[in-house]
Image: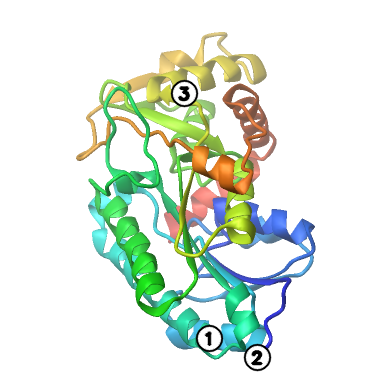
Amino acid sequence: MHPSSKTLLVTGAAGFIGSCFVRQVAEQGWRVIVLDALTYAGHRENLDGLAGVELVVGNICDGALVARLLKEHQPQAVVNFAAESHVDNSIERPSEFIETNIMGCYTLLEAARQYWGALPEMAKAKFRFVHVSTDEVYGSLGKTGKFTETSPMQPNSPYSASKAAGDLLCRAWFHTYGLPTIVTNCTNNYGPRQFPEKLIPRMIACALSGQLLPVYGDGKNIRDWIHVEDHCRGVMLALTRGLPGETYGFGGDAERTNIEVVTTLCHLLDVLRPRKDGKSYKEQIAFVTDRPGHDRRYAIDDRKAQETLGFTRTYNFESGIRETIRWYLDNQAWCEAVTKEKQAA
């Protein structure tokens, strides 16, 4: 087998972050095989019009399917975006997160190990397995400091625990078998095409429909926000410049409390899509009971990625959030369609 230097197998790439990554690499001339189960957060429409992209509907837990795709398409790398990712859902249905985020990662690693092990030596040296993860594996920060790649893992939800398990499996498959794995951890993403269960698109949807804007607890939980385009460029740098066995963190240098984010959204919507009654969307904000195990603060120090990969950010939060709101205002039909898909699922 001689892998194509311009072919990738990308899992979970019909979703928000994965589809952004695929758009970026497709524009660079890569051929991409997308494996996605098309659960409620994955949509064919996210890949429409992309040249050189083939969607295969299937589950990463299907080892025979993964092995067939590797043998048939001979990719140079596997990039794993596939995950159950919503904390609230993990509290209600943890078994789905264990299945996808742990068993799915294991299945991909084993299929990749068998494929990689049969490659010629030069091809083996070039092959990469990139696992895309989250800063939530590190738990909760105090008032100061940031997570780094050497921070201890202290997950506090079923979601973050399942992602931490995947990260550790990648580490083990590198140290035990030599499989050239790379793990990336990122802060909260925002941007177009994010499923409206996450904070920013959910608040936009609720505001426009006249619903209350539910903010957990006192609204002072802090998140660092990175635009999805910047994050995906970082993942590509990790793939092309990263060293096997390493972990790279990507942050946005844009820490905001949840209530600051929601208030910013309200201010911008007041300008871009004023309420018919002339009042501010802020009047729809409602504080609700906090969720269990709600981490207080996340932030990543990404100097390692900057210094070793050449990672830079092109978006600041102010310009990025305005552009994001405009996208949702211009694509309300998309939001309504995907929400109906979730309700029907």
Q: Amino acid at mark 3?
A: Val
Residue drawn where x is 27% and y is 20% of the image? 218
Residue 261: which numbered mark, if any? 3
Camera-nearest label, 2 or 3: 2
Determine which residue is flagged by label 1: 115
- Label 1 sits on what residue type? Tyr
Q: Are marks 1 and 2 in contact (CB under 8 Å)?
A: yes
Q: Marks 3 and 2: in contact by CB < 8 Å?
A: no
Q: Earlier in the sequence, mark 3 or mark 1?
A: 1
Q: Against 37, is 227 above or below? A: above
Image coords of residue 2 (percent x, y): 69, 86
Provide the secondary structure element on which disc 3 rests. helix
Query: Which of the two residues, 131 or 56, is positioned nearer the viewer here?
Result: 131
- Quarter-wise, where is residue 305 in the image? top right
Q: Is residue 287 depicted above or below 225 in this figure?
A: above
Gap between marks 1 and 2, in whole Å?
9 Å
Sequence order check: which comes first, mark 1 or mark 2?
Answer: 2
The N terminus - image quarter: bottom right
Give the residue pinned by disc 2: 1
Residue mark closest to the camera, 3 vs 1: 1
User: Residue at the top extreme?
Assistant: 278
Q: Is residue 228 left or right of residue 187?
A: right
- Residue 275 visible within the image: no
Residue in the foreground of this view, choosing between 102 and 196 = 102
- Sequence-first disc among 2 and 3: 2
Return the residue nearer the eye: 272 or 136. 136
**Relative to 337, does residue 171 appear above or below in the rendering?**
below
With 235 as the anchor, is 174 left or right in this view? left
